[in-house]
Amino acid sequence: MDSENTRLTLGSLARVEGEGRLAFTVRHGRVEAAELNIYEPPRFFESFLRGRDFREPPDITSRICGICPVAYQVSACNAIEQACGAHLTQPILDLRRLLYCGEWIASHTLHIYLLHAPDFLGAADAIELARIARPEVERGLALKKAGNAILELIGGRSIHPVNVRLGGFYRAPTPSELAPLAEQLRTALDDALATVRWVSHFEFPDAEIDSELLALAQPGRYAIEDGMLTTTSGLSFTPEEFCDHVEERQVSYSTALHAHLDGHAYLTGPLARYSLHSAELSDTARQAATEAGLGTVCRNPFQSIVVRAVETVFAVDEALRLIREYQYPNRPYVDISPRAATGYGVSEAPRGMLYHCYQLDFEGRILRATIIPPTSQNQAAIENDLRSTLSANLRLTDTELTGLCERTIRNYDPCISCATHFLDLTIDRG
Amino acid sequence: MTVTVVGTGNEFRRDDGVGPVVAQAIQLRNPAGMDVVIENGEASTLLDTWAGSELVIIVDAVVRNPSAGTAHPGKVRRITDRSVENFGKLTSTHGLGIMEALALAAALGRQPPHLVIYTIEAQDTGYGVGLSPTVAASVPLVVSAILAEDPDRDRQSPG
């Protein structure tokens, strides 16, 4: 071991989650191409799930993302439980929704405070923001901690929860264990409401995305952990029918697949959920949205920060409701027997809809697995947004454009598994 | 004194998993007064992890910047200097890591009173589990160094 004066650049940490490059071609003042190149190699999860036992995907796929592992666990459980014809009891389903609320709170708050807000307040990053807006950042950290507390209590730990199993949970919390959590969440609700007020006063550039929007729908409530697929063009279909409408395509410049809905780019995530189903939010969340100046539809990607804040209010409010009405399950899981079948599962990860499909043999071995993450679904729409942003701002310098493009991409909170240490921007101006 | 040992890294990326391997080895010895945690290195979680600890010891793999000269896989360094020059630039769109956690803690006045970072230079950060032999050979050295961390040893105060 030595302590000599070697200069280490600790930015080069080994944990490389992804890399990205954005290339524009401009000819005669027009943007001819905008290519978002994800050059991280494919992660092979779909391949190495083949031959594994049907009980393994919730744990294995949760490793795809350190920020939204619950989404992977729930979509995997939904798909395999459907394949096996399992029916979960309501208390178990409620507990799953409660766990997912924890992930929404933690993930949205991380993005709002540490990644997105600096863009609006002229701060280079979260650290500079902490210097100029310390009380707000402290509030954000406390709010995120409340989300983590749910994940720790229901999931066993906040990163890659270990208490989730096919059919439910290894252990259910007792009502007395939930009481202190409710106490923490009541304070978090005030913090979440203050967050909406804070971000609603940011300055939002004029922008409107015209992509089709896709989000899950559940009768009588804001969909999180399951649902039917619905779109702004009026489509409504089941998870089984997802691949009849959505096609993944390989593009030559990127290792990430692009998804298209009936041949068109589309968007999933907070703007889609809110625009399609804001009426299903809780009274408190809807009131916060109204006070923040949001209509019932929001298509300005910069305002996604407000929608995330509103959804955080909803997730805290919903978690409090679920704790209030909690029924301690007699058994924390239902038994599931394998059968030769194919199952389809969906859920709303904080950054968008996550689809899983598994084909099993009669012993429960996985024959085929398909996972379509939200960032892959959104990538074509993000490119379209980048193209129009660039077209409208060609007078800017390359440095200014890089900053603007980074902001544009951050509006979509892309997933850690396929997005990236932005941004290597190449502009070919001819 | 409360001591928190934080092992960070991804055990599915070969040598990047050395932090968790070291943490597990220390956990097995159950040293008195030492909390051992394995984290993914996400900034806001780290701030909570070390809240209330007098001494925080972070163990992580590093990849040497190619421009910084010859690589020495398995090389262990003990770092107590946390001047801002050592902080990496924030480049991720999504995650914030250990260096950002330290900078954020400094901005919020939530630094641990004493901090030691052990880095182990990685050889292989490809897909898969298991350390390369060179990096695995460094694990016992780091484990005994951490167990021998003396509260009075030369540590730099925050600032």
Image: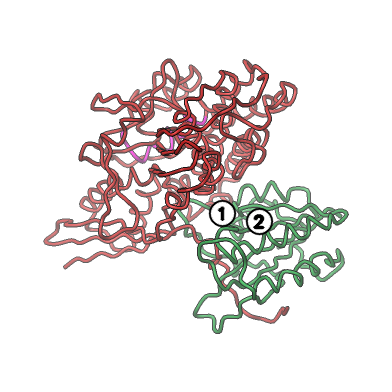
Chain colours: A red, B green
Q: Is residue A200 visible?
A: no
Are both tags, 1 and 2, on one chain?
Answer: no
Is A3 included in the stretch rendered in magenta? no
| Residue A160 or residue B116, whichever sits in front | A160
Magenta stretch, overall SS: helix
Q: Quadrant of residue A262?
A: top left
What residue lies at 50% left-to-right and 38% top-to-bottom? Answer: A364
Q: Quadrant of residue A39?
A: bottom left
| Residue A14 or residue A106, whichever sits in front | A14
Task: Label 2, secondary structure: give it.
Answer: helix
Q: Position of residue A81 (x, y in %)?
A: 49, 30
Subunit of label 1: A
Is residue A316 found left or right of A358 in the rendered image?
right
Is residue B39 found left or right of A344 in the rendered image?
right
Q: Amino acid at mark 1?
A: Ile
Furthest residue to the bottom?
B70
Furthest residue to the left?
A28
Callout 2: few (<14), some (14-19), or many (20+) C-alpha neighbours within 10 Å? some
Residue A101, compared with residue A218, is above or below; it is: below
What label sits on residue A127 in the rendered view? 1
Query: Magenta residues, as a range?
Result: A299-312
Task: Label 1, secondary structure: give it.
Answer: helix
What residue lies at 32% left-to-right and 51% top-to-bottom? Answer: A257
Badge 1 vs badge 2, beta-carbon distance below 8 Å: yes
Q: Is residue A317 visible?
A: yes
Residue A129, compared with residue A73, is above or below; it is: below
Name the image quarter holding the N terminus of chain A: bottom right
Real-space Cα distance between discs 1 and 2? 9 Å
Subunit of label 2: B
Q: Position of residue A373 (x, y in %)?
A: 40, 43
Q: Which residue is mark 2?
A: B106
What residue lies at 50% left-to-right and 59% top-to-bottom? Answer: B90
